Image (cartoon, rainbow, N blue to C red):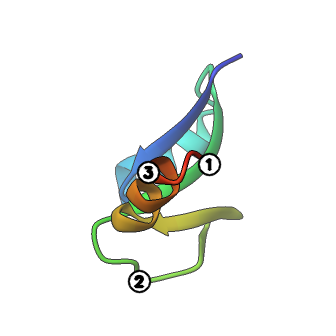
Amino acid sequence: MNNILIWGTGKLAGHFVENKCSAEIIGFIESQKTKDTFMQKPVSECTELLLRKSRGC
């Protein structure tokens, strides 16, 4: 099973979680982070992810 991040924390994102898409949702991304979690998954700001990638995380 693939791990995925979903961009956004709106209705469509919630739909993926509620309908158990075929991948493991490991978190959500927001352009400007407005919450720490969404549907019991962590939320990251896009710049956080870019910094992690540049550090090799």
- Secondary structure of the residue carrying numbered label 2: loop
Quadrant holding the N terminus: top right
- Answer left or right for 25 relative to 55: right
- Secondary structure of the residue carrying numbered label 3: helix
**Which of the pair 19/52 is nearer the observer?**
52
Q: How would you rate the neighbour count of disc 2 (Cα within 10 Å): few for under 14, some for 14-19, many for 20 or more? A: few
As drawn, 32 above or below 49? below
- Which residue was labeled with disc 2? 34
Rounded to the nearest angstrom, the CA distance separating label 1 from label 3 is 8 Å
- Answer left or right for 55 relative to 30: right
**Which of the pair 48/41 is nearer the observer?**
48
The location of residue 35, given as percent across then percent down, is 50, 82
Residue type at tag 1: Cys
Residue type at tag 2: Thr
The location of residue 53, given as percent across then percent down, is 48, 48
Residue type at tag 3: Ser
The location of residue 9, given as percent across then percent down, is 41, 62
- Answer left or right for 44 relative to 34: right
- Which residue was labeled with disc 3? 54
- Which residue was labeled with disc 1? 57
As drawn, 30 above or below 16? below
In percent of the image, x 58 and y 79: which residue is there? 36
Residue 13 in view of the camera: yes
Earlier along the polypeptide chain: callout 3 or callout 2?
Answer: 2
Rounded to the nearest angstrom, the CA distance separating label 1 from label 2 is 23 Å
